[in-house]
Amino acid sequence: MATERLVVVGGDAAGMSAASQARRLKGPAELEITAFERGHFTSYSACGIPYWIGGQVPGRDDLIARTPEEHRARDIDLRMRTEVVELDLAGGRVRTRDLDSGSEAWTGYDKLVLATGARPVRPRLPGIGAHGVHGVQTLDDGQRLMDTLERTEGTEGRRAVVVGAGYIGVEMAEALVARGYEVTVLHRGPQPMATLDPDMGALVHSAMNRMGIRTVSGAEVTKVLTDDHGAVRAVATAAGDEYPADVVVLGIGVEPRTALARAAGLPLGESGGILTDLSMRVRGHENIWSGGDCVEVLDLVAGRMRHIPLGTHANKHGQVIGSGVGGGYATFPGVVGTAVSKVCDLEIARTGLRERDALSAGLRFVTATINSTTTAGYYPTAADMTVKMLAELRTGRLLGVQIVGGAGSAKRVDIAAVALTAGMTVDQVVSLDLGYAPPFSPVWDPVLVAARKAVSAVRAAG
């Protein structure tokens, strides 16, 4: 039997999970695997970058799960610092460029995996390319930011501006405070953490203020001001304000890196992500798969395709893809949009739909918000906790949950994630048999208290 050729574009979570799973199912005599990665690192935790920057993780290499040498030892021909610049679908080949030498070559394939990831959103503003302006998506991005920070280490009065207050923006703001910077966060929304509804985002805003982070809502950044050497010196807003900065971090969000797919005519969704079927095959292309931050996935609650870039999804995509490439079978049915984060000791979690998501999907709903504690109120470690729940009118179907609170709050969102995946109603959530002991929960877990209030709201609305 002729050896099949698999080419993987992208050497992080989805790409190398796919390559590794395919190798488990087929040996080198059956499947030749070549993977291309444009950066210096592979198989790493991008989610851990803020904690490395902030000092909680001792070193960069602690974030690397598997080195290029370890992949090569498993008969995966992994070529670093090599960028795929063109897909020739008709010819079954990819054109690559060695980023160090500039040399180019074509590599043929029988099966292709696109795991090109996402890139930080960089608005087209004057000065956005200045020295000291950083997006943080890859480990290479993190290293460049760390290099900038270390050049000014020990200098008094260092100032940082974070543009955007999503997960990355908030986490990077905390990391920069830990490194001794005076931090200002500028964002366009009414409250930080647009992944939450504004009333829950206000709790995050208060926590950031308590940490000494200056948070400016409704701020539209118009330009980055530079000094005579082309380095950042301040960020300007539409209101005419200027915020001095020695470093700027972009936390506006990310967009799927799909220029290759677009140029090759592969199908893209509304957000620009690649469209696949449940087995992660690119729609209309039998021998091409895609996964990770470059694809759109099915939102099981709203019933729509969405771009939800998370490492948890990327690793699962890779397992599904590798099974398909290796002759097995697996599917990725979709997501409910679960995510957690923290600011100092405040834990933040959400799953399912926000109010604006539900409105956009044409759903009619009620909300219920409760205040409780993470443990029995009399237990010494009890911390405040706020839970907000959305439920569909008439049916009572659970639509979404948001949680903000002290230690022990965030992972409770997993209860809601399971309930959402199962299509449960808030009545059914109230009846869940959850574990109880004073060190872990009040007698009525806060999620159940919120569900009970949501049941009342559904009934009152008729």
Image: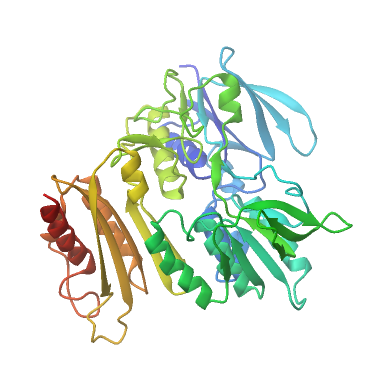
Quarter of the figure with residue 457: bottom left
Query: In this rendering, would 319 be left or right of 124?
Result: left
Q: Which of 151 and 430 is in front in this view?
A: 430
3 is higher (above) or lower (below) than 47: above
Seen at 13% across and 59% down, the residue is 456
- Residue 271 in sight: yes
Observer-nearest residue: 317 or 412?
A: 412
Residue 401 is left or right of residue 52, and the answer is left
Q: Determine whether, in the image, residue 387 is placed left or right of residue 106.
A: left
In this rendering, does residue 335 appear at all?
A: no
Residue 428 vs 33, above or below: the answer is below
Residue 225 sits in quarter: bottom right
Q: Which residue is drawn at 69% across and 59% down?
A: 248
The picture places residue 49, in percent across and down from the top left corner, at 57, 59
In percent of width and height, residue 202 lies at 43, 66
Q: Position of residue 402 (x, y in %)?
A: 33, 59
Q: Which residue lies furthest to the front in this view?
A: 239
